[in-house]
């Protein structure tokens, strides 16, 4: 176990439409690997010009609450859901930094697919000034960046040292060996639409909520 005067906490953003084991299991393993003190799940508000989640904000929030109710590793932060503006991760991280100060080690968790598209994110080049990036494996994706420049950026910031993640407040990319879960929210929504079982993909209380509210039909 890594001892640090300031514990390493992480934020995990996404649409969570619905939250599923592909979100939860890899990051639980990641938390053990890098000694994360807490993971804050932060569902995002989807801007009007993008395809809207099928479940509304309150429903997505309720499903996250049900999924993490028994696990103190997780907490929920609804600040992005409560905004009517687009959820830009960089702006949220700047806000969190103002709250927590510049020395608190802070990480943002993404799957491999998100790493590959990261350079399309708003002000992506500022992200590592604000946080570390912890990358979970995702079936069907490898970490092979599109351009030599992107690969150089990745190589320059990558670390395999958990100690480094705890020693610095931000700036590192850690590619974690996490268990593979071949699940996406899209596939789950399609299965529900076709009346196919989803018990192995979605926590039972979340599935009960989905059925009770007739979601994804
Ligand atoms: P959708 O199918 O609706 O696009 P999704 O299942 O990819 O959704 P999101 O809420 O968009 O889920 O993703 C939030 C974060 O979780 C992203 O960083 C994504 O890479 C990661 N993630 C989602 N599913 C998996 C999975 N099966 N394994 C690893 N990471 C995942």
Image: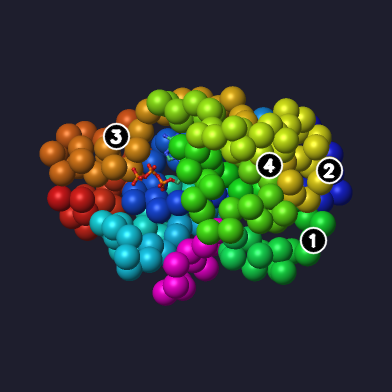
| Mark 2 / mark 1, whichever is N-terminal | 1
Marks 2 and 3: in contact by CB < 8 Å? Answer: no
Local crowd size for mark 1, using a 10 Å CA cut-off: few (<14), some (14–19), many (≥20)? some
Q: Quadrant of the N terminus?
A: top right
Residue occupied by mark 1: 102
| Mark 2 / mark 4, whichever is N-terminal | 4
As measured in the structure, the alpha-carbon distance from the residue carrying label 3 to the one carrying label 2 is 40 Å
In the rendered structure, the answer to whether residue 144 lies left or right of residue 168 reads left
Q: Residue at image x 29%, y 34%? A: 199
As measured in the structure, the alpha-carbon distance from the residue carrying label 1 to the one carrying label 4 is 18 Å
Q: Residue at image x 22%, y 58%? A: 213
Eyeballing the image, is 4 above or below 98? above
| Mark 1 / mark 3, whichever is N-terminal | 1
Q: Give the range drawn in magenta.
A: 76-89
On whether ligand 1 comes within 8 Å of the CB at mark 4, the answer is: no
As measured in the structure, the alpha-carbon distance from the residue carrying label 2 to the one carrying label 4 is 13 Å
The disc at residue 36 is 4
| Mark 3 / mark 4, whichever is N-terminal | 4
Kindly give the residue lying farthest to the right in the view shown.
5
The disc at residue 167 is 2
Mark 2 or 4, closer to the camera: 2
| Mark 1 / mark 4, whichever is N-terminal | 4
The disc at residue 199 is 3
Of residues 12 and 38, the one nearer the viewer is: 12
Mark 1 or 3, closer to the camera: 1
Q: Give residue 82's position: percent from left, percent from top.
A: 45, 72
């Amino acid at each position: 176990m890594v001892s640090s005067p300031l514990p390493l906490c992480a934020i995990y953003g996404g649409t969570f439409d619905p939250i599923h084991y592909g979100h939860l299991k890899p990051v639980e393993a990641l938390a053990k690997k890098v000694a994360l003190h807490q993971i804050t799940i932060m569902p995002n508000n989807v801007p009007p010009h993008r395809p809207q989640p099928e479940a509304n904000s309150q429903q997505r929030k309720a499903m996250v609450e049900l999924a993490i109710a028994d696990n103190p590793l997780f907490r929920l932060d609804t600040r992005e859901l409560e905004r009517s503006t687009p959820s830009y991760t960089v702006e949220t991280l700047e806000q969190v930094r103002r709250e927590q100060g510049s020395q608190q080690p802070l990480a943002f968790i993404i799957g491999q697919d998100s790493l590959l598209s990261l350079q399309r994110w708003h002000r992506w080049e500022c992200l590592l000034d604000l946080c570390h990036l912890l990358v979970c494996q995702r079936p069907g994706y490898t970490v092979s960046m599109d351009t030599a420049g992107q690969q150089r950026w990745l190589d320059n910031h990558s670390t395999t040292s958990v100690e480094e993640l705890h020693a610095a407040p931000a700036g590192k990319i850690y590619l974690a060996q996490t268990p593979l879960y071949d699940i996406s929210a899209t596939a789950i929504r399609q299965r529900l639409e076709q009346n196919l079982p989803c018990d192995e993909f979605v926590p039972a209380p979340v599935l009960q909520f989905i059925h009770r509210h007739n979601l994804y039909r």
